[in-house]
Image (cartoon, coloured by chain):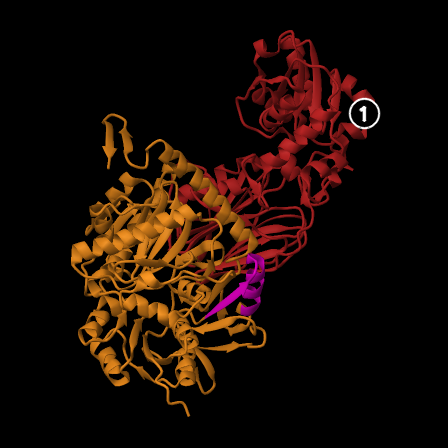
Chain colours: A orange, B red
């Protein structure tokens, strides 16, 4: 019988991301405890195997999470999803003296409020900014969108990617068709936002950029940021990057088509954001700050912030980290992150999310799901929006399972990921294109093209000042 | 030349698709002047006219076709726009026929066969999926080209997904798609058509023996070949013709009609050619009537000293067995005269063309060459 004291960690959340966190913590040898909205079969396994315990409760109810913490008395609490951060779960835990990894609610505003994030970026001159405007009236949003040309239209509040639209408007002869998309989208966002009562219904319109997306996830203790390898997420639900925006259908990491300098620039933007949060809101950012970036003709640009790990990006990052994740998380939570060493496995990873048909437009609850464990034997399977019943796995509507494959080459990782994703059976779908050689080739080409443009601009100082020439009105300078 | 097929699906629901359809069709006008477009609106599939500059076409999806004849067929469940010799039911995977289809229950099917024909897929923003024979048509609609469909790949596009099946058996592509039919700025299986044409022209330059002063191209396809040929020969290339109307003369089998089109598509710029030894470059040779006309214009009207001809493909000898409209074999000059007699018949100083082997080598992939054999 074991009598040594073993550290206890409470994981808040129930997605595949939290499953990955629990898995890494279990590998670190701690006892895993969990509080989750629904019993995630994967997290349950780690709880059971490490001798922990769990509670089913709404993780956005501060009191419920506090009760779980009081009951389990963990040495560390790790908060996975953004919604508990928004409502102040991390604040409440810290107030009660729990060592917590998770952004304070005021820091999490960088994710929750798109308008606040843009405001901070401009006020504190954080690199990677976009021109933007915030509108309550659909008509005003439309006029601003027309003036900008190509635009992204978003709800000002984080809503899991829902409602985001991009319209490339330089092609003026298509105006009539694209106008109706802009107007329809602005209307839909206003309606959608009425379901949130923590923010007024407004629409953010910003210049649309074109390029290669990547996510840089960093841990921060408020002083130092610790970056994980960059991950590429694929937010479109359907094959070949078509279809509606969703939580993310798969990821690739590391990324050979993003340069070291670009990553350093991105990491610097994340550090500047941590400092800006402290200056503006007077809180120390302890948790995860991720930049959902795009390498564009203006260089790396922040599309949006996450105040947590991405899902599925967390899977790649935590798998690749070579070391004790519990020790690393503690260093972040205790303000000792300067001691952390960034060592990562020399492997390529691909993650594929498997979702019930209907996702993300229609939630299919209670659809049966099977996993051919033999076919997926050399991959990791993470559970998300799924529960285990006596008769098998059943979907809860969102991404059900995420499959992580790795290899010593990108091709090997891709081939494995395809086989393992096909091991998830039922009325489900996943994207075959993510991670394929053709896909990576396309990304590399795109990255090289936009890199050529932004380097050209920078050589001429056009990144500092933008010269705007309006025929009939004259020349003006922005910035 | 095959038909220009296209399809569009709006994941954001019903909006006005008119400009996208009007310009999508326009972007493939190189493939003919007969256009059919069908739109899905409120569970009905209806034929619409998108030729006027502006109009309204509210719907969630549309399919269509641009060719020298109507190639869309209405079926019980919707409409199929197809090109190739086989009969097609929606969902089929024929060997030699490409199609886009739209059903009343809101599904778009996109199919590229293993053989001969191309179909590219792209997207605009988060809303529009666009498919087209010409990948550049996707760009004209402000979209981004994602890739060519695989050989034998069927894509089912509906509100809740894009499902792909098959796609690993890529057979020969129609050589004419590279040589002549496609837009220069289109991509087929990741290779731009212009790249292939540059290799064809370079191969042709190595064969030309005539000593010339300048190189000129027959509009429109011949102009790009001419630039590369001039580069290979170390000579200047000039624009020597002004086109009044766009028209693909090989598409028309009425000889009278063809003559009229030649006049409209190539009026000569005299000062470019007067007193010069001229190398004329064209993409293909069928009856030779275009070449004869042009040679006469250059010599008789504009005072060229010598007129040499080079063709970036072998001469046509057979009707296409796979459905491409061609003039009858009785109109193909190489079926009636030996090669050495042709320059005299066309009143030119020399004539150089590529062989099937040279085309194969320059293209660098398996191509169908039936019409040249």
Q: Residue furthest bottom?
A: A1
Residue A418 highlighted magenta (yes or no): yes
- Up/down of A441 relative to A470, above or below: below
Place residue A334 in its image quadrant.
bottom left
Residue at point 40%, 89% (across, down) = A2
Q: Choose between A357 and A390: the one closer to the eye.
A: A390
Question: Residue A124 vs residue A171: left or right?
Answer: left
Residue A192 highlighted magenta (yes or no): no
Question: Residue B227 vs residue A169: left or right?
Answer: right
Residue at point 25%, 27% (across, down) = A475
Which part of the image, by quadrant, shows the N terminus of chain A?
bottom left
- Up/down of B97 relative to B278, above or below: below
Place residue B355 in its image quadrant.
top right
Residue at point 74%, 38% (across, down) = B371
Percent coordinates x, y for residue B321 in the rendering: 73, 44
**Magenta region, residue range:** A402-420
Percent coordinates x, y for residue A350 in the rendering: 50, 62
Q: Choose between B345 and A138: the one closer to the eye.
A: A138
Q: Chain of mark 1?
A: B
Is residue A184 shown to the viewer in this render? no
Badge 1 element: helix
Place residue A246 in its image quadrant.
bottom left
Which part of the image, by quadrant, shows the C terminus of chain A?
top left
Is residue A32 shown to the viewer in this render? yes
Percent coordinates x, y for residue A453 in the rendering: 41, 37
Q: Read off the residue under disc 1.
A: B339
Circle 1: is it few (<14), some (14-19), or many (20+) Cα within 10 Å?
few
């Amino acid at each position: 019988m074991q009598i040594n004291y073993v550290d206890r960690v409470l994981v808040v959340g129930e997605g595949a991301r939290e499953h990955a966190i629990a898995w890494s913590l279990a590998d670190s040898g701690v006892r895993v405890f969990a509080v989750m909205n629904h019993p995630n079969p994967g997290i349950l396994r780690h709880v059971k195997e490490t001798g922990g315990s769990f509670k089913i409760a709404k993780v956005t109810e501060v009191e419920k999470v506090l009760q779980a913490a009081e009951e389990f008395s963990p040495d560390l609490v790790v908060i996975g999803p953004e919604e508990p951060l928004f409502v102040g779960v991390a604040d409440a835990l810290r107030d009660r003296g729990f060592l917590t990894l998770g952004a304070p609610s005021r820091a999490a505003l960088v994710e929750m409020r798109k308008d606040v994030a843009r405001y901070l970026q401009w006020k504190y001159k954080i690199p990677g900014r976009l021109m933007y405007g915030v509108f309550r009236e659909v008509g005003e949003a439309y006029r601003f969108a027309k003036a900008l040309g190509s635009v992204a239209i978003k709800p000002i509040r984080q809503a899991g990617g829902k409602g985001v639209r991009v319209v490339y408007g330089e092609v003026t002869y298509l105006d009539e068709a694209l106008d109706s998309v802009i107007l329809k989208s602005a209307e839909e966002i206003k309606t959608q936002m009425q379901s949130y009562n923590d923010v007024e219904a407004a629409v953010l319109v910003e210049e649309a950029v074109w390029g290669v997306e990547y996510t840089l996830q960093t841990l921060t203790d408020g002083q130092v940021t610790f970056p994980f390898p960059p991950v590429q997420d694929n937010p479109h639900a359907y094959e070949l990057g078509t279809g509606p925006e969703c939580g993310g259908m798969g990821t690739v990491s590391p990324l050979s088509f993003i340069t070291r300098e670009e990553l350093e620039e991105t990491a610097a933007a994340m550090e500047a954001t941590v400092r800006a949060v402290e200056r503006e809101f007077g809180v120390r950012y302890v948790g995860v700050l991720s930049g959902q970036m795009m390498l564009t003709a203006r260089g790396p640009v922040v599309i949006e912030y996450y105040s947590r790990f991405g899902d599925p990006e967390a899977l790649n990052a935590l798998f690749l980290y070579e070391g004790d994740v519990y020790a690393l998380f503690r260093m972040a939570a205790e303000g000792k992150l300067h001691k952390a060493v960034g060592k990562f496995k020399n492997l390529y990873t691909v993650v594929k999310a498997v979702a019930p048909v209907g996702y993300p437009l229609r939630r299919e609850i209670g659809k049966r799901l099977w996993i051919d464990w033999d076919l997926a034997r050399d991959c990791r399977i993470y559970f998300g929006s799924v529960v285990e019943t006596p008769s098998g796995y059943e979907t809860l509507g969102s991404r059900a399972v995420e499959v992580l494959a790795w290899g010593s080459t990108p091709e090997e990782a891709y081939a494995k990921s395809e086989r393992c994703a096909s091991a998830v059976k039922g009325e489900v779908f996943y994207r075959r294109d993510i991670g394929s050689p053709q896909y990576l080739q396309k990304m590399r080409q795109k990255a090289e093209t936009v890199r050529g443009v932004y380097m050209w601009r920078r050589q001429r100082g056009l990144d500092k000042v933008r010269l705007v020439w309006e025929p009939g009105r004259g020349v003006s300078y922005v910035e | 030349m095959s038909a220009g097929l296209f399809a569009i699906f709006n994941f954001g629901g019903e909006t006005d698709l008119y400009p996208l359809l009007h310009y999508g069709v326009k972007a493939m006008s190189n493939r003919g002047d007969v256009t059919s477009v069908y739109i899905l609106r409120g569970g009905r599939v209806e034929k619409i006219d998108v030729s006027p500059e502006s109009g309204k076409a509210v719907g969630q999806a549309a399919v269509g076709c641009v060719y020298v004849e109507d190639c869309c067929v209405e079926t019980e469940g919707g409409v199929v726009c197809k090109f190739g010799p086989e009969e097609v039911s929606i969902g089929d995977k024929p060997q030699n026929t490409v199609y886009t289809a739209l059903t009343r229950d809101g599904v778009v099917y996109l199919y590229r066969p293993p053989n001969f024909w191309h179909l590219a897929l792209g997207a605009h923003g988060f809303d529009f999926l666009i498919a087209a024979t010409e990948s550049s048509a996707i760009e004209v609609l402000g979209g981004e080209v994602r890739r060519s469909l695989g050989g034998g790949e069927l894509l089912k596009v509906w509100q809740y997904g894009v499902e792909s099946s098959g796609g690993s058996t890529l057979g020969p592509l129609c050589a004419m798609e590279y040589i002549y039919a496609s837009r220069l700025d289109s991509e087929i299986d990741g290779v731009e058509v212009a790249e292939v044409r540059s290799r064809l022209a370079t191969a042709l330059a190595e064969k030309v023996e005539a000593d010339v002063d300048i190189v000129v191209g027959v509009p429109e396809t011949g102009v790009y070949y001419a630039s590369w040929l001039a580069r290979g020969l170390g000579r200047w290339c000039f624009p020597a013709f002004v086109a009044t109307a766009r028209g693909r003369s090989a598409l028309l089998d009425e000889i009278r009609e063809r003559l009229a089109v030649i006049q409209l598509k190539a009026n000569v710029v005299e000062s470019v050619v007067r007193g010069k030894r001229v190398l004329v470059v064209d993409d293909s040779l069928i009856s030779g009537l275009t070449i004869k006309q042009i040679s006469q214009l250059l010599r008789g009207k504009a005072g060229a000293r010598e007129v040499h001809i080079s063709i970036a493909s072998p001469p046509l000898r057979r009707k296409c067995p796979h459905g491409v409209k061609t003039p009858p074999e009785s109109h193909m000059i190489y079926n009636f005269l030996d090669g050495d007699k042709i320059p005299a018949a066309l009143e030119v100083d020399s004539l150089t063309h590529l062989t099937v082997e040279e085309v194969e080598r320059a293209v660098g992939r398996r191509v169908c060459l039936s019409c040249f054999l």
